[in-house]
Image: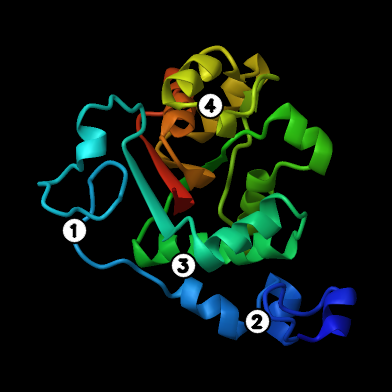
Amino acid sequence: MNILSLIFDQGCLLCGYSDSFSEKYGLCKKCAFPLLFHEKKGEKCHVCGRPLISEDGICMRCRNEDYSFDTNRYFWDYDGVAKTVIGLYKFKGQRRIGRFLALAVYRYLRRKGLDNVLLVPAPCSPARLKKTGYNHMEAVCRALKGLHGIPFAAVLRRRRGRQLKKLGKQERKEELADKLYIKPKDVRKFQSLCQGKHIILLDDVFTTGTTASACSRILKENGAENVDIVTFAID
């Protein structure tokens, strides 16, 4: 590992190798490309995006769910290198990785032929916002707008409450029932921006789908016709 490259914030955050790619994206090409060009084959659940085993169309997890979003699509399983990369960005403040995650989203949108898109970043908890000073999903959206011109609307807000990662599925639903909202001035802004747009909620990890569903419900109550979810990983 090249320690000097890490000290001067140029090297790959996984292996330390320094190249032009790592300077911009936080990962060298050797570490980044297996993630960037990874795509799961086979039939996937129409709802959550997980691979289907013997199910038809919808996986067993989603059959009894009443999600407010239309579909979720994700890039990686939340383990190994992907988990490390997301953790470096989300918990360790390695902002260069935000550009890499933005690149992954851009490639997905291009591959799927999705245009006329409006991104909405999932809201950050007040505690995390206070600790890090920025909304990590909004930062990815800003990178997508700056690098590729994709518009976004950071309108969702979250009130102070318990940490979701410590809660079960039902507890998450109860916790989020009155914690998510859009400010009145942002409602008008969102209603204007979302007209005729493909609304995509961007989040880091899909676990139970509770947060994605609660956010989608708020967006639909305030003008969105359809909401698809894009997440970096699924747990």
Per the model, the C-alpha gap separating discs 4 and 2 is 36 Å
Give coordinates of residue 184: x percent, y percent: 64, 15
Left or right placement of residue 190 versus residue 213 in this view: right
Residue annotated with mark 2: 28
Q: Are marks 4 and 2 in contact (CB under 8 Å)?
A: no
> Could you say whether the residue bearing mark 2 is in a helix, strand or loop?
loop
Q: Which residue is mark 4?
A: 167
Nearer the observer, 129 or 107? 129
Q: Is residue 199 above or below residue 40?
A: above
Q: Amino acid at mark 3?
A: Arg
Q: Which mark is residue 107?
A: 3
Q: Are marks 2 and 3 in contact (CB under 8 Å)?
A: no
Precedes in sequence: disc 2 or disc 3: 2
**Mark 4 or 1, closer to the camera:** 4
Distance from Cα at disc 1 to Cα at disc 2: 31 Å
Query: Looking at the picture, how far across and down is residue 222, in whole percent?
Result: 48, 20
Q: Which residue is mark 1?
A: 43
Report the Cα–Cα distance between label 2 and label 3.
Answer: 17 Å
